[in-house]
Amino acid sequence: MSVLLIGTLDTKGTEFAYVRDRLVAAGVRVIVVDAGVLAPAAFTPDIPRERVFAAAGTTYASVKAAGDRGKAVMLAAEGVAKLAAELHRDGKLTGVMSLGGSAGTTIGTAAMRVVPVGVPKLMVSTLASGQVQPYVGTRDVMMMHSVVDISGLNRISRVVLDNAVAAMAGMVSFSRETKASGSDKPVIAATMFGVTTPCVEAARTQLETAGYEVLVFHATGTGGRTMEGLIRDGLVAGVLDITTTELADELCGGILTAGRDRLTAASLMRVPQVISVGALDMVNFGPPETVPAKYKERRFQQHNPTVTLMRTTPEEMDRLGMEISQKACAANGPVAVMLPLRGVSAIDAEGKSFWWPEADAALFQSVRNWIAPNVELIELDLHVNDPAFAAACAGKLLEMLKASV
């Protein structure tokens, strides 16, 4: 088992040789892969650039001849990702590490994002103090700021690289020691927002008592995408999708969308799922000045200085009900939709700021209109955060899991 060290050995060979030698000195086996294009590699890698570009369906010679740096970076990223996936599949990969600027970060993190959660991933990057979502994606990628550019060894870069080596060596050693002690309980994925926390926490307790390990995902866009990815990876036995609020952000242009594929992975993977409508009463924007002008006459609540909540209208709730029903009807596995008829969030209750019975009624009626006979629809005269609603959702999922064994 080895750490895959991914680099452009034509421009940063000295730095990669330093990291390789420090990892080896720390007792870590290293596989160096060269993703460079411009000049010859500074030292002989374990995996040459020819293999990288072959994995991307092309040749190094043709990439070099084209002289298109941007295209070369994209092909190198594709190639290292395929090689990393193969090495992990074959049981030869303990971790992935890289260092670089924008090109090196693009290439290195492409390989990290195809490796499952739990495999150590460390990217030393000049971009680590900025917007890193495109590089991290939904994986547990650790980004370390290089402070100075990765251009030669000096009093700062040596310290940063030494710390990075120590971090990778520690993660690899620790993951080997703890792998055997991991839980073997079947996993349930659940979605939660602050306004649905009482429901999800009560359901989680019930599911854990029944012998399941519950992973709760904050429905902030990234949370939903991460959950969908883990379901597609085959790691999840059941889904308690209480909080489908990300669908509202996708519909209305909010900042917490999880994309159009939200609420699809469990259906494709035949994973039992209980779906509800938690927090569909709201769309998330940033500070008030960031709310689109077309919404200026809408109902808002200032959640905090950086988050502005907008109440969804009856028309929007109607469309959300149709989307949930259609996605539930497309499921290849067991599915149930559960409706809390007295409100879908902590602030959607009588006397609260987002209480709008007509909007909720539009949501519920839309679900009824579009749901297919093969999908179980359960309507309860309860609020989403009532303990009885939480118990009913958890109980229904346990029933489905038992029947699917």
Image (tube, rainbow, N blue to C red):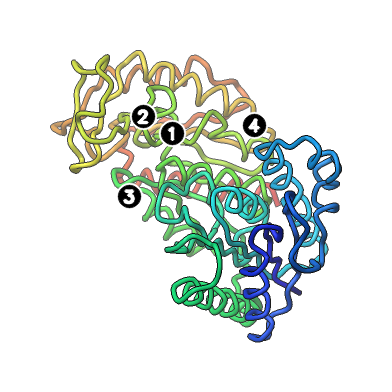
Tag 1 residue: 257
Q: Crowding at label 2, few (<14), some or many (≥20) Cα neighbours within 10 Å?
A: many
Q: Secondary structure at mark 2?
A: loop
**Can I make out residue 364 in this image?**
yes
Mark 4 / mark 2, whichever is N-terminal: 2
Q: Nearer the viewer, mark 2 or mark 3?
A: 2
Q: Disc 1 to disc 2, how far (Cα)? A: 6 Å
Residue type at mark 4: give it.
Ala
Label of residue 254 in the image: 2
Mark 4 / mark 1, whichever is N-terminal: 1
Q: Crowding at label 3, few (<14), some or many (≥20) Cα neighbours within 10 Å?
A: many
The image position of residue 203, as x and y in percent, is 42, 53
Instruction: For the residues labelled 1 and 2, say whether their Cβ atoms are less than 8 Å apart.
Output: yes
Residue type at mark 3: give it.
Thr
Tag 4 residue: 331
Q: In front here: 158 or 287?
A: 158
